[in-house]
Image (cartoon, rainbow, N blue to C red):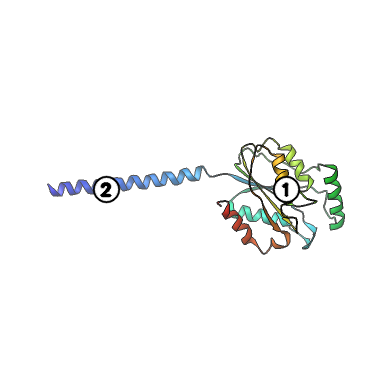
Amino acid sequence: MRIAKLWIAVVAMLTVMGCNGQNKQEVKQQKTSTMNKAIVIFFSHAGDNYAVGNIEVGNTKIVADYITELTGAEQFEIVTHKYDGMAYNPLIKLAKEETKNGELPEYEGDVDLSPYDTVFIGGPVWWGTYPQVMFTFFKKHAGDLKGKTVIPFTTHEGSGLANCIEDVKAAFPEANVQKGFSIYGHEVRTEKAKVEKWLKGLGY
């Protein structure tokens, strides 16, 4: 009789353990299926840049690549050839005029933002905010980020985030715009750890 009771107890314990293992598996699968899908939207300028000289890969592109590597986010680069081959001083003069006049340069291609829950938005700081070509993108997608988490970032040489956060909030008033991140352009090639620390703070 005692042996029979002992056997029943062992069977019951194994059954409970099996159920717990199954529940853990189900929870893991559920977490995987509900993970936020993210994308990095960015503009980056290669060529003649302040403090780093003539570079083949733009500072912001490097940060965007770090984000993709560390979070698995997809990318869409805002590309215009308007500034190709320009020396730094003429480029900044042109950028100043574009900002002053509220110009909206065209960019190549486009992206559907509907599948994404989190949108990183990054670019250099030109005259106190993002380059105007990014505002072309913002205007085109003004209603596409409702309820989404938006995380701005910048590369700069002393401007920090400038007015970028405020401008993103104004462009996407129904988005959940988070605290932004900024990094010096001359640091991006050697200070990946700063980007990693920022992303860890966001839960990545």
Outermost residue, bottom direction? 190
Q: Is residue 27 left or right of residue 144?
A: left
User: In this figure, which residue is indicated by the disc labeled 1?
Assistant: 164
Query: Judging from the image, what secondary structure is the residue with disc 2 in?
Result: helix
At 51% from the left and 42% from the top, the residue drawn is 34
User: Could you say where residue 175 lies in the image, as x and y percent from the top left?
Assistant: 64, 39
Q: Is residue 180 left or right of residue 158?
A: left
Going from N to C along the chain, the mark reached first, 2 or 1, is 2
User: Could you say where residue 125 lies in the image, as x and y percent from the top left?
Assistant: 76, 52
Is residue 139 visible in the rendered image? The answer is yes
User: Could you say where residue 177 lies in the image, as x and y percent from the top left?
Assistant: 64, 44
The one of 67 and 108 positioned closer to us in this rendering = 67
Q: Is residue 153 above or below residue 53?
A: above
User: Could you say where residue 108 lies in the image, as x and y percent from the top left?
Assistant: 76, 43
At 38% from the left and 44% from the top, the residue drawn is 23
At 53% from the left and 45% from the top, the residue drawn is 35
Query: Judging from the image, what secondary structure is the residue with disc 1 in?
Result: helix
Is residue 87 visible in the rendered image? The answer is no
Is label 2 in contact with label 1 (beta carbons under 8 Å)? no
The amino acid on which the numbered mark 1 sits, given as a three-letter code, is: Cys
User: In this figure, which residue is indicated by the disc labeled 2?
Assistant: 13
The amino acid on which the numbered mark 2 sits, given as a three-letter code, is: Met
- In which image quadrant can residue 194 be found? bottom right
Question: Label 2 neighbourhood size at 10 Å, few (<14), some (14-19), many (20+)?
Answer: few
Mark pair 2, 1: CA separation:
59 Å
